[in-house]
Image: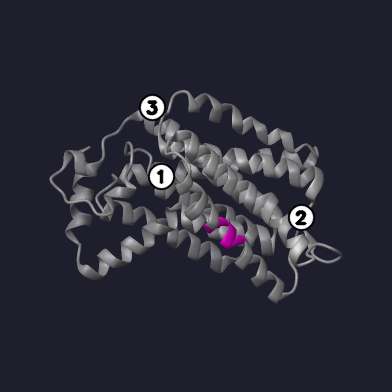
Amino acid sequence: MELMQRISEYVISLRNPLLDWFFTLVTMLGEVVFFTLVVAILYWCIDKDWGFRLGFAYLFSGLANTWIKEICRVPRPFELLDIDPMRVETAGGYSFPSGHTQQASSLLIVLMEAIKKKWFYILASLLIILVALSRIYLGVHWAFDVVGGIIIALLCVLLSNWLYSLSKAKKTPEIMGIMIIPLLVGLFIFKTSTYYTVGGTLTGLFIGYILDTRFIKYKSGGPLLKQLAKCLIGIVGLLIIKLLVEPGLAEGLGTDFFVHGLLSIWLTVLAPLLFRLVLRDNQDTGAEG
C-alpha cells in the first residue's frame, strides 16, 4: 500500500492547468456518453454485429465491476490521503477496480478486435494507458485499481465475445441471457443507481438482440446522406428519452432501470424500425451486420 501511496502522490504532484484539462478530457473516454455514441453509430451505420458485441462486452464488464467493488471494498485515495480529488462526482462507490479504466478498456479492446489494424492497436493501447493514468492523476484511484480494471476488462470481453459467438453459431440469441442471471441476483443486493442503470441497459440490449435476430433483421450501412439522417434521428430519440421522458418519471432505482432499458430498445429496435419507415432503410440494400 505504501508503494501505491507514493505513486499517487507523485502523479498528483505533476498537476498543472494544462494537464488538468487534458486528463479531465481523457477520463471521459470511460464514461457512458462516449460509449453510447460509439455503439449507436457502430450499430446503425457500420456493423450491427459489432455493435451488439461491443454493447454486451461493455455492459457485462460494468456488472462485473460493481460485483468486484462490493466484494473488495477498497477505499479511494482521497479517503485515505491528504489530496484534493478532481471530478469526484465520477467516483462513486469503492476504488477497486477502476470503473472508468475497465469500461474504456472494454470498449477499446472490442474495437481493436473489430478494426484489426496496427495503427489502431497502438492508438487504443495508448488511450487505455492515458485513461488509467487520468484516474490516478485525478486522485480517485490507486495504481492497482487501474491495472486490475484493464485485466478484468480483457477477461470480460473474452467471455462476452465467446458467448456472443456461440449464440450466433447456434442461431440462439437467448444464450446471451446467461448474463441476465447475475444481473438479476445483483438487483437484490446492490441498491445503487449505477447498478440499476447498467442492469436496465443490458436487459434492453438483450431484448433488442432477440427481437432483431428473430424479427427485425436490421442491416447496417447505406448511402452517406442516409447514414447521417439515421444518426440525427437516432440521437434525437436518445435525447428525448433522457431529457423529456426521464424527468417526467418519479426518481428511483426502478426509473433508472426502465429509462436505460428503453434507451437500449430505442437503439436496437425502435430507431431501426423508424429508419425503415421514414427513410425506407433496409429495403433492398445494406450489409447484414
Q: Is residue 147 magenta?
A: no
Question: Which badge, 2 or 3, is on the more N-terminal residue?
Answer: 3
Q: Is residue 104 above or below residue 171?
A: below
Question: How far is mark 1 from mark 2, CA to CA?
Answer: 32 Å
Q: Nearer the viewer, mark 1 or mark 2?
A: 2
Q: Which mark is residue 99?
A: 1
Picture residue at 32% right of the left edge, 30% below the top: 73
Q: Answer with left or right where residue 229 lies relative to residue 247.
A: right
Region rendered in magenta = 234-239
Question: In the image, what residue type sits under mark 1?
Answer: Gly
Q: Which mark is residue 218?
A: 2
Q: Is residue 238 magenta?
A: yes
Q: Which mark is residue 71?
A: 3
Q: Quadrant of residue 65?
A: top left
SS for callout 3 = helix
Question: 112 or 198, which is in the foreground?
Answer: 198
Question: In the image, what residue type sits under mark 2?
Answer: Tyr
Question: 53 or 253, which is in the foreground?
Answer: 253
Picture residue at 63% right of the left edge, 60% below the top: 42
